[in-house]
Image (spheres, grey):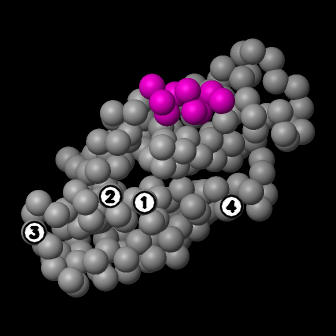
Amino acid sequence: MNSTALLLNAYYEVLHDLLVENKSRLTEAAGSLLREELKNRSFGSFNRNKYDAYLDACLAFIAERTEMYNPIGIQYTIDRIPSGLAQELELQLNFYDSRSEFQKLKDAAAELAQKGFSDDQLPQLAARLIAEHGAFPDKSIISAYQANPTLNKLPDYITALSIEKTIKA
């Protein structure tokens, strides 16, 4: 494994640990951000059951994202080499395009790795990537939602905002 890949793996591992350690903060943030977003958008009436369903979806997405960053399973998300058709299908399923964001993250990791580092420095370098770039693919999700806010994008958006708020705290 090259040093850039090693640093990216550390980035995901640190993100995983942050989300696990801050599960209650993420839950609180999701509830608060969801209430705020619903108040500021005209998505129609939201009774308690509908609100609870959207909050449950947000919390499920947070759990899914936490597992995505899990060092044991990250290779299935990041190291896979999908076919061109698989990539196109993934882009059609997602409402956001995160290719540019991922490239910027990889470029930043490569730049940091180029300077060399020891194993002891990996967590600090990973924390630096997180501080500078956030949690991938949050920026893509947030900007796509803000460009065209819809209810079907709301759980992803609240998840991304909750994660960003938590990792920056």
From what the image shows, is residue 75 above or below residue 42?
A: below
Tell me which numbered mark, 3 or 2, is placed earlier along the sequence: 3
The magenta segment:
24-32
Q: Main secondary structure of the magenta part?
A: helix
Dots 3 and 2: beta carbons under 8 Å?
A: no
Tell me how far mark 3 sits from mark 2, CA to CA: 15 Å
Disc 4 marks a residue whose amino acid type is Ala
* Point 76% across, 38% down: residue: 37
Mark on residue 118? Answer: 3
| Residue 108 falls in image quadrant | bottom left
Q: Which residue is mark 1?
A: 131
Disc 1 marks a residue whose amino acid type is Ala
Mark on residue 121? Answer: none
Which one is closest to the eye, mark 4 or mark 2? 2
Furthest residue toward top: 48
Dots 2 and 1: beta carbons under 8 Å?
A: yes
- The answer to whether 40 appears left or right of 156 in the picture is right
Tell me how far mark 3 sits from mark 4, CA to CA: 37 Å
Query: Could you tell me if residue 32 is visible in this image?
Result: yes
Q: Secondary structure at mark 1?
A: helix
Residue 152 in the image: x percent, y percent?
Answer: 70, 43
Residue 60 in the image: x percent, y percent?
Answer: 49, 32
